[in-house]
Amino acid sequence: MDETDASPVSHITVAEVMRDSFLMVDGMNTIRDVLLLLRGSQAHCLVVYKCHDADEYGVLLVSDIGRKVLATGRHPDRINVYEVMSKPAITVPATTDIVYCAQLFTRCGISRAPVVDKTGDIVGIVSLNDLVLRGLQPLFENIRTESGDGEAVPKAAQQTEQQRPEEHADD
């Protein structure tokens, strides 16, 4: 394999792109409790605590609540987290290369996962968006230019309305 075949994002780890602030809940909490916790938060995923040492972590996504509670007409006060969560959670080691993490997400059909350290403790959450937007960002640093207001803007986004071909001119 020559240098042109090498991944341009190799050696970027999940730890470099993950979000280290995350919410954890007990499986016995109600969905109402979770919704109150999520209010004002940027979180789309909650980690569910283990019940005991031999247990596994669970994951509760906002989309799970939409599909399994809202869409089915169930009342958030009457549903516990454990009824809606996914368990065991697929976790990703913090040292994993983002390319392999993206491949894992694709193979498993998931969009986010808890990140674990060497001892198996959760240290963050990583999403496919994080992998793409934070992991691929370094590729674009050398092709960015300055806009008029000093903000960095990709060259492709600098095209003005006057430069765009008119579509549907006869409309």
Image: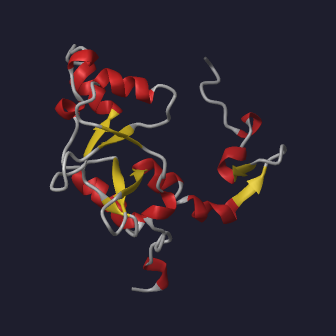
Q: Is residue 37 visible?
A: yes
Name the side, left or right, on which 14 lies relative to 79.
Answer: right
Query: As displayed, is residue 41 above or below residue 107?
Result: above
Residue 90: image quadrant is bottom left
Q: Nearer the viewer, residue 67 or 81?
A: 81
- Residue shown at 48%/52% (left/top)? 20
- Vertical order, 33 against 146 (above or below): above
Q: Quadrant of the N terminus?
A: bottom left
- Color style of the picture: secondary structure
As displayed, is residue 3 above or below residue 107? Answer: below
Residue ID at (30%, 54%): 105
- The residue depicted at 52 percent of the width and 52 percent of the height is 133
Tell me residue 42's x, y (percent).
50, 35
- Side of 40 relative to 157 (left or right): left
Residue 111: percent from left, percent from top: 34, 47
Query: Residue 66: where, in percent of width, then height?
Result: 30, 25
Would you say 3 lies left or right of 151 here? Answer: left
For residue 78, which quarter of the picture?
top left
Tag count: 0
Residue closest to the far front: 52
The answer to whether residue 135 shows anywhere in this view is no
Residue 16 in percent (x, y) is at 51, 63
Horizontal relation, residue 165 to residue 123: left or right: right
- Identity of the residue drawn at 22% across and 13% down: 73
In this rendering, the answer to whether 141 lies above or below 45 is below
Q: Residue furthest bottom?
A: 2
Query: Closest to the observer: 143 or 52?
Result: 52
Quadrant containing the C terminus is top right
